[in-house]
Image (cartoon, rainbow, N blue to C red):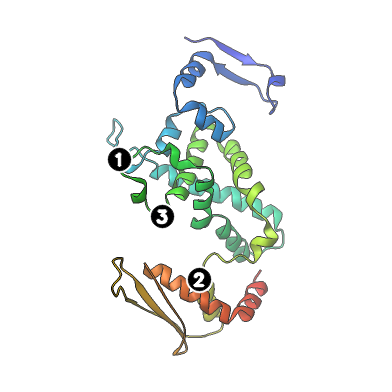
Amino acid sequence: MGLVVIMPAYYLKSGINMVFNFNELFNLNKDPFYKPIKNLLQFQPKSLMYYKRAFTHRSLNKKDLNGIAVNYERLEFLGDSILSSIISSYLFKNIPTGSEGYLTQMRSKIVSRSHLNELGLELNLLQFVESNISEENYGDNIHGNLFEALIGAIFLDRGYPYCKKFIFQKVIDPHVDLEKLKNKVISYKSLFIEWCQKNKKIYNFETFEDSGNDPIKHFSVKLSIDGKIISKARDTSKKKAEEKASKRAFFMFQEDILKYQNQNS
């Protein structure tokens, strides 16, 4: 049995007594993964197991003794819920007059896939990934997926308070400005559809493959309101083409759409 020492409260910024098993700490220090993950977290992990799983890609086909897949995907699911909970609590406390719909919109802007991808990229989470495939085959959302998996790992290792502290340090304090966020558009398509439905306008996205001589498949879209084409766009996926067409339509009706958006804040 290893030596157990209770550290006095004055050694700790939190003022909470903690029990350190020096054998475990020594073993952690020997693992080359320990120092870089500790530097990322800005606190000492109790176990490296969850963090290693958070950066294990499914392409490795790892399984535990029960035959359950060992990769970051289940942790990503858990981290998504924890992140959403902490952001929801923050918004509830800091926007006391916000309606349920407005708070949901604001949360969606903070935890949007594009924003999570930016966070994962900023933290350089790809450096920790173990995989059997090259980076270009990871998919567009790998950075955000890893960020959520990391949150899940922190929760299982150190609990909710450490998750909250990490999210405030990495997400809320440096990136969340409620005034600026208020007018930020995450999805032009969603906003445009919502505005059309509210104003009883009939919209239609006519999307078709339009690769031409391009080696990469392309799609074109015609966006119409009440039977009249108002914008066109072309991109490498239906989703991107429709978003681009919606953005162009947004700027045509910007004044009316923003007025509607402010009325519902």
Q: Which residue is mark 1?
A: 132
Residues at marks 1 and 2, CA–CA distance in whole angstroms: 36 Å
Residue 34 relative to residue 185: left or right: left
Amino acid marked by disc 2: Ser
Residue 37 on image: x %, y %:
50, 32
Q: Which residue is mark 3?
A: 140
Residue 58 on image: x %, y %:
32, 43
Above or below, comparing residue 39 to residue 254 in the picture:
above
Q: Nearer the viewer, mark 2 or mark 3?
A: 3
**Residue pictured at 36% horizontal, 50% vertical:** 136
Q: Which residue is mark 2?
A: 190
Q: Residue 6 appears in which quarter of the rendering? A: top right
Amino acid marked by disc 3: Asp
**Residue pictured at 71% horizontal, 62% vertical:** 97
Residue 224 on image: x %, y %:
45, 85
Q: Secondary structure at mark 3?
A: loop
**Residue pictured at 63% horizontal, 42% vertical:** 169
First in residue order: circle 2 vs circle 3: 3
Mark 3 residue crowding within 10 angstroms, few (<14) / some (14–19) / many (20+): few
First in residue order: circle 1 vs circle 2: 1
Amino acid marked by disc 1: Asn
Q: Is residue 81 visible?
A: yes
Above or below, comparing residue 34 to residue 189 in the picture:
above
Q: Nearer the viewer, mark 1 or mark 2?
A: 1
- Residues at discs 2 and 3 in contact (Cβ within 8 Å): no
Q: Secondary structure at mark 2?
A: helix
